[in-house]
Amino acid sequence: MSLFPSPLLDAFSALVDRLAELLQPLAADASTAAAVVVFTVLVRLAVHPLSRAAVRGQRARVRLAPRVAALREKHKNRPERLQRAILDLHAEEKVSPFAGILPSLLQVPAFLLLYSLFSSGDRMGGHQLLAAPLDGRWTGALGDGGPFGPAGLVYVALFATALAVAAFQYVRTRRETPAGPAGGDVPTALGRILPLLSFGTVVTVAVVPLAVALYVVTSTAWSAVERALLMRRPLPPSVPTRA
């Protein structure tokens, strides 16, 4: 059963078909796959202002890490006072704890629309990326020529791209995440787990329809480049904690 009413899926299918028609002269038989990529770019452009706000929040949290560490030391025996002091500091610096998740949350409808569209074979069946059907999955490619068959090689390329992007994000997240209670407001265990979430993309590629996997890889690669560009400016010096 689809998550969306049939008229909405019909309208979305018509949008993808229209994009594919426009891209036909450039992408030929891969025009529907190219339409998915263009749709992904349009979604990312729509949430770009929120992505900028999320990066500003991340940069602010990194900048405030020494002050948070000082607060932890000052109130180490008074957890409620510590929590209040950290919340007050974030409010004073206009740092929202939700800014980092808004871009991802607002992409969920696009992800689910694509998933619903390409999971219903009566709408987008027959469209391919090279030898791999866009409504097919990796398990289907394994049963049709194996991992290095014509369809399997499409997934090999996607897996390789997803792994490369995940490794890049892992390194950056490890560098950007405060190292624990002494160094910031991210708990030590969470600080260790967060970088590993980058590799969730690889698992997603393995289980969703190919068109959705293409969306996920394109969006993740966009996010990695976008974040690297937005974070490249040096941080201002931290302001000492007031007594």
Image (spheres, rainbow, N blue to C red):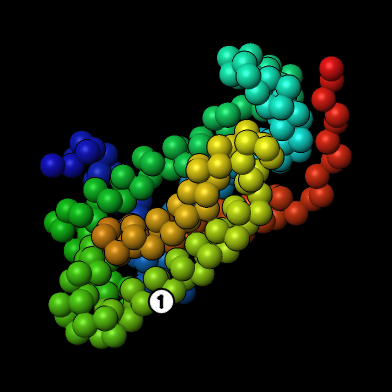
Nearer-the-camera pick, 156 or 72: 72
| In this view, 107 is above or below 83 | below
Direction from residue 102 to residue 238 in the image, left or right: right
Nearer-the-camera pick, 239 or 52: 239
Direction from residue 214 to residue 96 in the image, left or right: right
> What is the tally of numbered marks visible in this picture?
1
Q: Tag 1's secondary structure? A: helix
- Residue 87 on image: x %, y %: 64, 19
Q: Residue at x 47, y 55 (%)?
A: 196
Q: Residue at x 46, y 68 (%)?
A: 163
- Residue 123 on image: x %, y %: 19, 55
| In this view, 122 is above or below 141 | above
Q: Residue at x 70, y 50 (%)?
A: 230
Residue 226 appears in the picture as rendered: no
Nearer-the-camera pick, 153 or 127: 153
Quadrant hosting residue 124: bottom left
Residue 5 appears in the picture as rendered: yes
The C terminus lies in quadrant = top right
Quadrant hosting residue 240: top right
Density class for disc 1 (Cα within 10 Å; few <14, some 14-19, many ≥20) is: few
Direction from residue 30 to residue 143 in the image, left or right: left
- Residue 226 on image: x %, y %: 63, 54
Q: Residue at x 40, y 71 (%)?
A: 158
Q: Which residue is mark 1?
A: 157
- Residue 155 on image: x %, y %: 33, 74
The N terminus lies in quadrant = top left
Q: Give amino acid for label 1.
A: Ala
